[in-house]
Image (cartoon, helix red, strand yellow):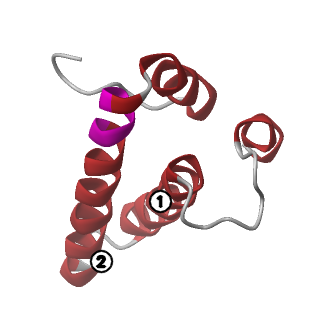
């Protein structure tokens, strides 16, 4: 995932850039998902995962409204599903 997103993240140190935030949230989501496969009854981690997914969804909605071409590029490079109806 590092090689693919290095093309997307224009400003490496800019944590406020929408694509950077989506990348970091996707990385956290994958780590939490693997943790929850080992510990399925860890409900506090489940809640944290849902919060991260909601934050990532809102960033994806913002990106899809601002720049559709970049939105599709991000989805393709990060291998995540698109939003429903977008």
Q: Residue at x 56, y 56 (%)?
A: 17
Whether the magenta-drawn stretch holds residue 75 is answered as: no
On-image quarter of the C terminus: top left
> Which tag, 1 or 2, sits closer to the chain's start?
1
* Mark 1 surroundings: few (<14), some (14-19) or many (≥20) residues within 10 A: some
For discs 1 and 2, the disc positioned in front in the rendered view: 1
Query: Which of the two residues, 20 or 54, is positioned nearer the viewer here?
Result: 20
**Left or right of 42 on screen, residue 9:** right
Query: What secondary structure characterizes most of the magenta part?
Result: helix
Which circle marks residue 44 in the picture? none
In the picture of the structure, the residue carrying the numbered disc 2 is 45
In the picture of the structure, the residue carrying the numbered disc 1 is 25
Against 76, residue 46 (above or below) is: below
In the image, the segment drawn in magenta is: 61-65
Q: Residue at x 19, y 78 (%)?
A: 43
Q: Position of residue 44 (x, y in %)?
A: 22, 83
How far, Cα to Cα, is label 1 from label 2?
A: 14 Å
Q: Position of residue 14 (x, y in %)?
A: 67, 65
């Amino acid at each position: 995932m590092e090689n693919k997103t290095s093309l997307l993240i224009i400003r490496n140190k800019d944590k406020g850039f929408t694509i950077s935030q989506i990348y970091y949230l996707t990385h956290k989501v994958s780590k939490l998902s693997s943790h929850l496969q080992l510990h399925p009854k860890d409900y506090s981690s489940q809640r944290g995962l849902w919060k991260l997914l909601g934050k990532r969804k809102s960033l994806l909605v913002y990106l899809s409204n601002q720049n559709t071409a970049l939105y599709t590029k991000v989805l393709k490079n990060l291998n995540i599903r698109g939003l429903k109806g977008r």
